[in-house]
């Protein structure tokens, strides 16, 4: 028997891409491919790309350039480009990079195995359709998973059209998956040992499959025995319905963690960004969420240096951050994305944006430390992902998604324990088992 073929996938960008990469690996697995961590031994290399910020496409082209000697040494090697750069650049990739065998968009990757059969002898194959059929109906069932945590895509695409963002163009319009399908997929995951599910969507809280909102879906998922934790990301403030806020207060399996990007604290900039909410509305929403779940850990995304952002606008962002007190946040310097409305506007000088980015990052880092330190002495749940580096130690995620090292010689991967946090270091917490 011949050896299994090897697939190397490099994943860029968001959690949705991490999820898509797993599903593509499974689709290729059904064709006899096993994954490898080493591109050099691969029979197929797949770059699952992200287009959200600047230089994304250029990075992909330079990564492809670096694959050239590998392919020259191993002429049968296949190279594929998937994800949002594939969607946005399309045939341009094939033109610029003759070594690429196939280009596949985020909505058509269930066709990957079939596309692969059409490659060879220099034939280049492309599929960036938004097909009528649902890719999830055509993908193999989820395999055994690596740890107790899994992603589950419940919604894709976005109809919000924030002025800076390519997602509505690369991922397409909002589509929710049928609720019953998601419940049976979640049950299957739990049977395979999953204890913790993060529901994914570009606009996940706009979920409306089978007439259910996200809150209803979460409540039904919570009834699955053996499933212990539920989270969801990424949400838009305008889609935080009352029943979802309420679920944070009364659904114990819904973890006290919420990623709720605001992007800016200036109403003028929010308007220019087409966010359709004010800073005040966001702050009121945070109050309601905290009233429902006082210990919730909040995270956000911020863009600094959006066209037209003044010192006063930036100061408004800093004061919103101070008012909220985040557990963590991603901070980005604005970068013009071709085809988006904001790309038409003049950009700020790079030094101005850089200085603002640094100031915001420093504030966020302080808040992140403070949030971690505030955990010391508290009791929380931890779900073990893996053994720690020291003997008798386990590593896992807390309810609030902090990485926690626990001294627990009897600990098992997949076990959910109660711990008392004893110390906070830069990127993790230390804990001991809580006494019953
Ligand atoms: N420039 C900078 N950051 C961006 N993001 C999206 N588009 C851009 C852009 N053009 C950020 C937003 C979004 C996150 C995923 O990426 O903050 O929430
Ligand atoms: Fe992009 Fe805005 Fe949609 Fe988020 S809500 S994916 S930032 S357009």
Image (cartoon, grey):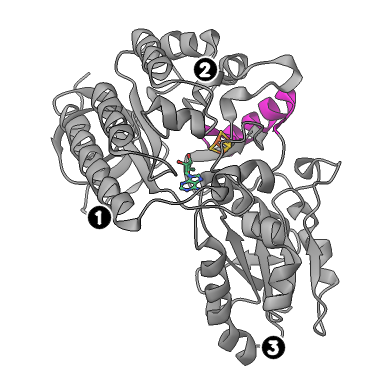
Residue 219 drawn at (x, y percent): 57, 14
Residue at 19 percent across and 27 percent down: it is: 375
Question: How many marks can you see?
Answer: 3
Region of the chain picked out in magenta, as a range: 174-201
Q: Give the residue at mark 1.
A: 389
Please tell me which of labels 1 and 3 falls first in the chain: 3
Residue 36 drawn at (x, y percent): 55, 69
Q: Give the residue at mark 2.
A: 240
Residue at 80 percent across and 74 percent down: it is: 124
Residue at 16 percent across and 44 percent down: it is: 425
Q: Give the residue at mark 3.
A: 75
Q: CA distance from mark 1 to mark 3?
A: 40 Å
Q: Residue furthest bottom?
A: 73
For mark 1, give the secondary structure: loop
| Mark 3 surroundings within 10 Å by alpha-carbon count, few (fewer than 14), some (14 through 19), many (20 or more) | few
Label 2 or label 1, whichever lies nearer to me, is 2
Residue 377 on the magenta span: no
| Mark 2 surroundings within 10 Å by alpha-carbon count, few (fewer than 14), some (14 through 19), many (20 or more) | some
**Residue 180 can be seen in this image:** yes
Q: Quadrant of residue 255?
A: top left
Q: Say which of 125 and 173 sits in front.
A: 173
Whether the residues at callouts 2 and 1 have beta carbons within 8 Å, the answer is: no
């Amino acid at each position: 028997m011949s050896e299994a073929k090897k697939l190397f996938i490099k994943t860029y960008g968001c959690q949705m891409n991490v999820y898509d990469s797993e599903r593509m690996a499974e689709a290729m697995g059904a064709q006899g491919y096993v994954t490898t961590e080493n591109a050099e031994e691969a029979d197929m290399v797949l770059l699952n790309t992200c287009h959200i910020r600047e230089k994304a496409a250029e990075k992909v082209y330079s990564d492809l350039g670096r694959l050239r000697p590998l392919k020259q040494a191993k002429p049968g090697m296949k190279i594929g480009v998937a994800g949002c750069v594939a969607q946005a650049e399309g045939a341009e990739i094939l033109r610029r990079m003759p070594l690429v065998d196939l280009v596949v968009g985020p909505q058509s990757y269930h066709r990957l195995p079939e596309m692969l059969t059409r490659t060879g002898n220099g034939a280049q194959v492309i599929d960036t359709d938004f097909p009528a059929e649902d890719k999830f109906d055509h993908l193999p069932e989820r395999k055994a998973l690596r740890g107790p945590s899994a992603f589950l895509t419940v919604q894709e695409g976005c109809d919000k059209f924030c002025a800076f963002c390519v997602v509505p163009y690369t991922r397409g319009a909002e589509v929710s998956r049928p609720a019953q399908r998601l419940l049976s997929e979640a049950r299957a995951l739990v049977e395979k040992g999953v204890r913790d599910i993060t529901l994914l969507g570009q606009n996940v809280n706009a979920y409306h499959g089978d007439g259910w909102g996200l809150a209803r879906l979460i409540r039904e998922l919570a009834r699955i025995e053996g499933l212990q934790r539920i989270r969801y990301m990424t949400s838009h403030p305008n889609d935080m319905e009352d029943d979802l806020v309420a679920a944070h207060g009364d659904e114990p399996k819904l973890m006290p963690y919420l990623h709720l990007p605001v992007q800016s604290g200036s109403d003028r900039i929010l308007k220019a960004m087409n966010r359709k909410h004010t800073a005040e509305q966001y702050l009121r929403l945070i109050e309601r969420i905290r009233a429902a779940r006082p210990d919730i850990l909040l995270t956000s995304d911020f863009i600094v240096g959006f066209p037209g952002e003044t010192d006063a606008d930036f100061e408004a962002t800093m004061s919103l951050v101070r008012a909220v007190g985040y557990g963590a946040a991603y901070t980005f310097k604005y970068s013009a994305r071709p085809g988006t409305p904001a790309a038409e506007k003049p950009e700020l000088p790079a030094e101005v944006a850089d200085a603002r980015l640094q100031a915001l990052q420093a504030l966020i880092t302080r808040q992140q430390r403070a949030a971690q330190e505030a955990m010391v002495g508290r009791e929380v749940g931890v779900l073990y992902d893996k053994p720690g580096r020291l003997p008798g130690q386990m590593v896992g995620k807390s309810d609030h998604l902090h990485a926690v090292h626990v001294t627990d010689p009897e600990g098992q991967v997949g076990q959910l324990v109660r711990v008392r946090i004893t110390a906070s270091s830069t990127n993790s917490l230390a804990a001991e088992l809580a006494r019953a």
